[in-house]
Amino acid sequence: MPMFRSAPRVLVAGALCLALATPATAAPPSPAEAKMIAAVEAERERHIGLLEELVKVNSGSMNLQGVEQVGRMMRAELEPLGFDVRWIQMQKTGRAGHIVATHKGNGRGKRMLLIGHLDTVFEPDSPFQAWTRRGDIAEGPGVGDDKGGMVIIVAALRAMQAAGTLKAADIIVVLTGDEEKPGSPIELARADLIAAGKASDVALDFEGLSRAGGQDIGSIARRSSNSWTLKTTAKSGHSSGVCMEGPGCGAVYEMTRILDAFRRELPEPNLTYNVGVLVGGAQASVAADETGGTASGKSNIIPAEAVALGDIRTLSNEQEARVRAKMQAIVDRHLPKTNATLTFSETGYPAMAPTAGNRALLAKLNAVNETLGLPQMPEGDPASRGAGDIAFVSFIDGLVGLGTAGEGSHAPGETVDLTSLEVQAKRAALLMTRLSQEPRGKR
């Protein structure tokens, strides 16, 4: 009997997957939507050319002049579309700055915040600097993350202008210059983004499109990303007395106790925690840039110091607070004659939890897919994405992953599927136009 009861569930699941993978029957676009679709198609090579020019300018987060140059290039795209473009200097955070561009519409529709970033992970000393194109695949530093996303923003807005729908739309575009390596203090680095979020009803994030099995995925959440430092200290001495009443077990055993307890006691859904650097000995320290460390000692000396660096990712800020408290409780259970301190970085990213409002936005995007004759986009797993700027404005409804599809993000050989640029620009133009025609809520 159990075999027969389980069979219908398998059939239903299979039917659901088939339905999601099958293109929807196209609902006729409005005349304005047809113009937007045609405008995106007509300007395909223009936008690929813009992408090439952006990629050819190195804009690693710490290449301040390069980030500013990409900012000027984006200003040149946005101002002719009627945006008031400001460059926000970020000298106090050690970074270049941000673009904040505002388009005033008729004041009636949903206010939209479009989010992207000017910087990449590839600094000037990276060997990966060149743009190459092989048919519908382009390769280059930041080609997808996030220069492809910025081009989609431009392509969608130009299509709206061509169709006459941009005029009524209230839009703020924020392109941060330090998404890959945020400046500090983070409160200052993200103050302008948060202010833009408070002036908006909906946030649309133009980082990379998620795909699974060749299918485009809808993303309504991003996990947090916060780093932590664990330091243990102990009384040193000759190893012949290790873990005895006098000297105790030392700093490395205390470190091992804590990390193993994290492994055993912390697991829960949507949580990951990692130990990235670990050093210990008679003396131990980590480098200023936290990319490594040094330790000294001998096999017959009980270690006095140990340091570990790691990160933690959660699906909600409530989960973050709960897990941090559990970590601290584990740390506080010291072995005799040892001590430990746990601290968290001040430059971390909050979580963007999945909400009913975010799911409603994905439903609207799927209505656009129906008009375009594209398959429906199922809700994706937040664990498949990294942290992102949209989480700072998660107090409004948001949608993630409106940028290009590609492979190898953050690594030499990063590529983008150029066909996704056109598809995503159409999706964005239609979605933004429809949102601009919805009455805004009272805030």
Image (spheres, helix red, strand yellow):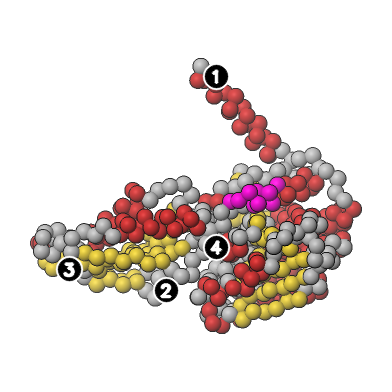
* Amino acid type, label 3: Lys
Instruction: Please provide percent x and percent y for residue 296.
Output: 24, 71
- As helix, strand or loop, the secondary structure at mark 2 comes to loop
Residue pointed to by mark 1: 4
Classify 10 Å Cα crowding around label 2: few (below 14), some (14-19), many (20 and above).
few
Residue at which label 2 appears: 289
User: Which of the marked residues, 4 or 2, is nearer the chain's N terminus?
Assistant: 2
The amino acid type, in three-letter code, at marker 4 is His
Q: Nearer the viewer, mark 2 or mark 3?
A: 3
- The mark nearer the N terminus, 1 or 2, is 1
- Marks 4 and 3, Cα distance to the nearest angstrom? 42 Å
Dot label at residue 395: none
- Give the extent of the magenta segment: 354-363
Q: Give the alpha-carbon distance from disc 2 to disc 3, as whole Å.
A: 28 Å
x then y, percent, for residue 436: 79, 59
Residue 258: image quadrant is bottom left
Residue occupying the point 18% across, 64% down: 337
Q: Nearer the viewer, mark 4 or mark 3?
A: 3
Magenta stretch secondary structure, dominant:
helix
